Amino acid sequence: MNKVDLTRKTKAELLKIAQRLGLRGISTLKKPELVERVQKAQLSRSGQVQKASTGISGVARRVADAVKRRAIRKRDEAEAAKARKTPLMRATRPLAGSRVAPLPVAEQPVSVSPLEEISAHKFDVSPSAAQPKQAFVEEHLGELPEAYGTGRLFLTARDPNWLYAYWDLTGKQMADYRSQSSDGRLLLRVYEKNHPDPIQELTLQHDARNWYVPVNKAATTYHAELGFWKHDGTFQTIGRSREAMTPSATVSPDTTACFTTIPIDISFRELLGIVRGHMNEGETLANALHRLQRAGFKFPFKVGIDLGPWTSEQAAELQSILGGDVLRRIQMGSFEISEWLRRRLEEQMGSAMFSAFSPAGASWSGAPQKGFWFAVNAELILYGATEPGAKVTVDGKPVELRNDGTFSFHFAFPDGRYCLPAVAVSPSGDDTRAIDLTFERESRAKGDVGHVKQPGHLRAPKVA
């Protein structure tokens, strides 16, 4: 197979050929390098085969010589054994008139047994056959394809305000669908349950294989469609996802907690054997253990740990870390709560003040007071996305990008008119994009309305 034929093959096919040739360390090679390695291996193997074919006669001669030497050695051993059994004949003077020649003394040949020969050479130093070295064999199962081409569309909820969509289409399939589209683009349409019209219609980039979709309703069911507009004005659907429900933005009102003791010195099989006869239909092992332990069932291990009474100092410490009762009333995402906990621990805030940011941009703080009361405040959240690796500044301050290029920035937002300049510089530094965002807040209160204190790390944007 010449180089042109190898170049026409895919990388997966080249990897299979390389495996058959016994090549190692090839999984990280690029296609041109892989072609060179395969071609060299094929040329080397063809040369070895030719050399082996031309040397067959030499091998046959060596085998024949070995067989001949073995036959001669056996014949000499047989003659030596026969000579040991034949009596010696000495030469005598011939009788008068006789023409019989004198018989010489038969000389006994020196015979060496195979065991004696081996023993005689057991101390000779000679190179032994090289032992095969243990070599690492790379197991290459092939590279995963970019897609399987099933055409299926998947939709899931990331948090109460974001959906994540992913479609299984190969590059060729996406190119074919774009060629049938009236504008050369694919669309992602998001529907809310029991609504005939899409709430969003997103135009996708050519190389996009997934998309994050912001939604403004928590605890709501959605589904999505992937397709394109045809030249006749109709919408062609490529794939339709199953329904996905965004989680609730509030903490569950069920505050009950179930505790059970699971011993570490008893295997799961033994523990299941103890409880199996007392489990209800469809009941899990943990729930069955909890129910039986509360009922006083006698187990072959100690149940419960005596921690003593819950002291007021422990309650105050927990309140200083978690923010007290207000934790059950706020809404936040996993990213925001982790960032909030990190900041709280760094700042060592000991009061019951709590501030966290939700994906929807709401932040609530303050502890409940006695009687009827009302407190309101606002924060400004700027969010967006750009190419990963770019540099972004908001209000002159660098913003750290996430792995997918998204970012968010929080500001205090008192009454007034403010301007927020945002600048993005490409990873190569040769392109710059900028935008100036202007915001205005004017609060008008009716009655006694207080302000919730905001965290000290938040600063207000520049006054416009």
Image (spheres, helix red, strand yellow):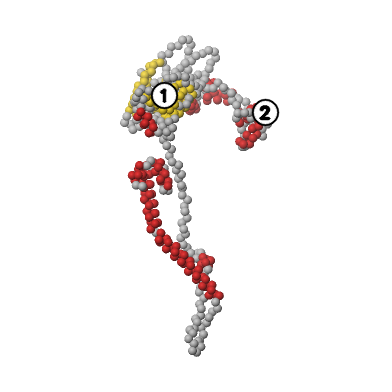
Residue found 65% across the figure and 29% down from its top = 292
User: In the image, residue 325 lies at what x, y percent?
Assistant: 54, 21
User: In the image, residue 143 lies at what x, y percent?
Assistant: 43, 39
Q: Residues within 10 Å of mark 1 (few under 14, many from 20)?
A: many
Distance from disc 1 to disc 2, alpha carbons, whole Å, reads 56 Å
Q: State the mark number for residue 63.
A: none
Can the viewer see residue 360 in this picture? Answer: no
Give the amino acid type for the residue marked by disc 1 in the picture. Arg
Residue found 38% across the figure and 26% down from its top = 228
Residue pointed to by mark 2: 296
Q: Is residue 35 above or below residue 92?
A: above
Can the viewer see residue 16 in this picture? Answer: yes
> Which residue is outermost to the top?
447
Give the amino acid type for the residue marked by disc 2 in the picture. Gly
User: In the image, residue 254 lies at what x, y percent?
Assistant: 57, 22
| Numbered label tally | 2
Q: Answer with the quarter of the image where residue 6 lies.
A: top left
Q: Residues within 10 Å of mark 2 (few under 14, many from 20)?
A: few
Q: Answer with the quarter of the image where residue 144 lies.
A: top left
Closer-to-camera residue (199/216): 199
Q: Quadrant of the C terminus?
A: top left
Q: State the mark number for residue 189.
A: 1
